[in-house]
């Protein structure tokens, strides 16, 4: 009986060891699906992004100036530029052309085309 339990424990441990790299690969795949857009000093970089459905944009605050972020699917908390923000990721599941702006800086806008 002890031999059977030892065999089962060894098999479970082996399965866990094999599952960890697979989970890490899944996280890398999800990260690879994200396109990074930086909110820099008065502009988005890049200002035009084309994606397929299911991909995402990771908005990253960069540069010296404060920014806000307004657009479809952006939470209200990102409207307030009072503090520097952590990156925010938005997944795009519907086709279309979407516009995003920083209302603090006139002309600071970007588009995301989802195919």
Image (cartoon, rainbow, N blue to C red):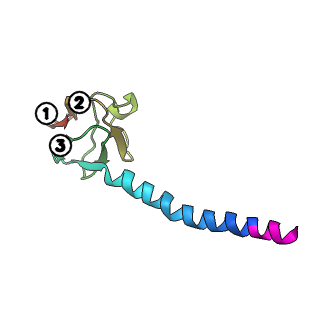
Disc number placed over residue 95 in the picture, else none: 2
Q: Residue at x 27, y 52 (%)?
A: 62
Image location (x, y in percent) of residue 13: 67, 67
Instruction: Give the camera-side residue of 60 and 67.
Output: 60
Q: Residue at x 31, y 33 (%)?
A: 93
- Which of pointers 2 and 1 lies earlier in the amino acid sequence? 2
Dots 3, 1 in contact, CB < 8 A: no
Kindly report the distance in space between the C-alpha atoms of the residues bearing marks 3 and 1. 20 Å
Q: Which residue is mark 1?
A: 106
Q: Point out the frontmost of discs 3 and 1.
A: 3
Q: Is residue 84 in view?
A: no
Which quarter of the rendered picture does the N terminus lie within?
bottom right
Instruction: Give the camera-side residue of 64 and 100.
Output: 100
Label 2 neighbour load within 10 Å: few <14, some 14-19, many 20+: some
**Above or below for 99 versus 85:** above
Image location (x, y in percent) of residue 67: 27, 40
**Start-end of magenta stretch:** 1-7
Image location (x, y in percent) of residue 27: 44, 55
- Which of pointers 3 and 2 lies earlier in the amino acid sequence? 3
**Above or below for 94 versus 42:** above
Kindly report the distance in space between the C-alpha atoms of the residues bearing marks 2 and 1. 27 Å
- Which of pointers 3 and 1 lies earlier in the amino acid sequence? 3
**Above or below for 18 versus 30:** below
Label 1 neighbour load within 10 Å: few <14, some 14-19, many 20+: few
* 54 magenta-colored: no
Q: Point out the frontmost of discs 3 and 2.
A: 2
Kindly report the distance in space between the C-alpha atoms of the residues bearing marks 3 and 2. 13 Å
Q: Residue furthest right?
A: 1
Image location (x, y in percent) of residue 17: 59, 67
Q: Is residue 93 in view?
A: yes
**Callout 3: SS:** strand
Disc number placed over residue 49 in the picture, else none: 3
């Amino acid at each position: 009986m002890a031999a059977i339990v030892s065999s089962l424990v060894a098999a479970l441990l082996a399965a866990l060891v094999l599952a960890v790299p697979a989970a890490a690969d899944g996280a890398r795949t999800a990260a690879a699906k994200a396109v990074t857009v930086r909110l820099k000093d008065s502009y988005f970089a890049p200002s035009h992004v084309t994606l397929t459905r299911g991909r995402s944009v990771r908005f990253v605050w960069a540069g010296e100036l404060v920014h806000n972020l307004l657009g479809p699917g952006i939470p209200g908390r990102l409207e307030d530029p009072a503090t520097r923000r952590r990156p925010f990721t938005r997944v795009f599941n519907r086709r279309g052309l979407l516009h995003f702006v920083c209302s603090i800086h006139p002309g600071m806008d970007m588009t995301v085309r989802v195919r």
